[in-house]
């Protein structure tokens, strides 16, 4: 089976079994979009009030801001407690759901490939939570988010000169992270499908990548290109609704603030659900591609019987 056949079959599996698999992609994407939105909002405000843009907040301004936040929280204690509890729940779900649902999705897709029922896949995901969680922490150290956080911290606090001086180191870390993620491509599948530990899974994955370098590289690059296209499609799909929301919200808040706030909440929830669904759909498809690739590379072909003399 070549790369084109793998991608075609993975898309067929995604379409046919989407109703059974969508929650395994949607739920982690849902919490991921929420946390990513908060993270981007933080980065935006951090850059906005940094020395880099000449609008750094002074000590008195920070104290005044803290007093205003405390006063608002004290005046609405019930709502503040609710928001804090909700934030903790969202963060816990953001940390815990990806390892469980990724293991479940890998197991379910392999069973679908073997024409078996997917019942029991969630149990497999729960059983492999700790190794999958540890693997996510390990690879997260080399992720784009981590590198962006480090770069933005250097740029905001130490200025452009220090940032450009540290840029070669940051680029080296980015390149090393890309190579490491490439070598660890099949580690998750060894953990879930072969019941191996993290260290052995990483070693086996690296050996398999090197032994099948051309095919793995083609699938790796192809999935990166498809991922970029999916993200662009998500942005384009959500751009028009977001513009409509912004304009409608502007006029709604002018005439009636309560109606405007309710409309903002409903519109934000709708955009969150749509974006999570699209990202979850792509996650299922990408996992199906790698499950099929892993199965093809690990399963030994059956020996053909010798011809009769």
Image (cartoon, rainbow, N blue to C red):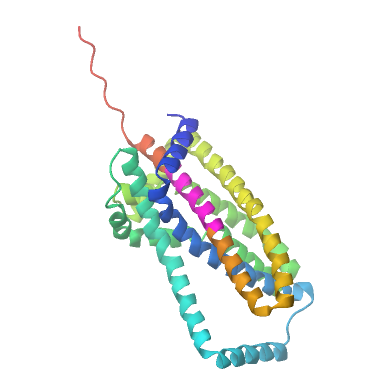
x and y percentages locating residue 193 in the rendered image: 31, 47
Q: In the rendered image, is residue 49 in sight?
A: no
x and y percentages locating residue 200 in the rendered image: 34, 51
Residue depicted at 50% across the width and 31% down the height: 4
- Of all residues, the one furthest to the left in this rendering is 309
- The quadrant of the rendering that contains the C terminus is top left
- The quadrant of the rendering that contains the N terminus is top left
Q: Is residue 27 magenta?
A: no
Q: What stretch is highlighted in magenta?
A: 274-289
> Magenta span: helix, strand or loop, mainly?
helix
Residue depicted at 64% across the width and 92% down the height: 67
Taking 91 as reference, is 124 above or below it? above
x and y percentages locating residue 105 in the rendered image: 38, 51
| Closer-to-camera residue (82/149) | 82
Q: Is residue 277 magenta?
A: yes
Residue depicted at 42% across the width and 55% down the height: 23
Residue depicted at 47% across the width and 76% down the height: 86
Q: Looking at the rendering, which quadrant does residue 256 occupy?
A: bottom right
């Amino acid at each position: 089976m070549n790369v084109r056949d793998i991608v075609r079959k993975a898309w067929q599996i995604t379409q046919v079994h989407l109703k059974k698999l969508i929650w395994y992609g949607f739920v982690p994407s849902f919490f991921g979009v929420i946390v990513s939105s908060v993270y981007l909002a933080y980065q935006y405000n951090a850059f906005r009030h940094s020395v880099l843009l000449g609008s750094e907040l002074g000590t008195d301004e920070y104290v005044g801001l803290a007093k205003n936040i405390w006063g608002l929280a004290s005046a609405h204690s019930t709502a503040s407690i609710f928001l804090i509890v909700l934030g903790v729940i969202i963060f816990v779900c953001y940390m815990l759901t990806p390892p469980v649902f990724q293991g479940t999705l890998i197991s379910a897709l392999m069973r679908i490939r073997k024409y078996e029922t997917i019942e029991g896949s969630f149990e497999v995901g729960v059983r492999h939570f700790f190794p999958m969680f540890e693997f996510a922490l390990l690879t997260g150290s080399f992720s784009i988010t981590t590198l962006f956080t480090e770069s933005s911290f250097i740029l905001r606090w130490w200025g452009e000169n220090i940032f450009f001086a540290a840029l070669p180191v940051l680029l080296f870390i980015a390149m090393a992270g890309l190579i490491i993620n490439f070598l660890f491509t099949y580690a998750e599948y060894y953990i879930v499908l072969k019941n191996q530990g993290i260290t052995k899974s990483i070693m086996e994955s690296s050996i398999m990548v090197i032994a099948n370098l051309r095919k793995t590289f083609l699938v790796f690059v192809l999935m990166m290109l498809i991922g970029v296209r999916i993200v662009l499609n998500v942005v384009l799909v959500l751009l028009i609704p977001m513009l409509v929301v912004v304009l409608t919200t502007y006029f709604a808040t002018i005439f009636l603030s309560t109606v405007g706030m309710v409309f903002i909440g409903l519109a934000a929830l709708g955009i969150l659900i749509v974006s999570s669904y699209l990202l979850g759909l792509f996650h299922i498809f990408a996992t199906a591609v790698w499950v099929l690739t892993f199965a093809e590379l690990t399963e030994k072909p059956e020996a053909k019987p010798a011809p009769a003399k």
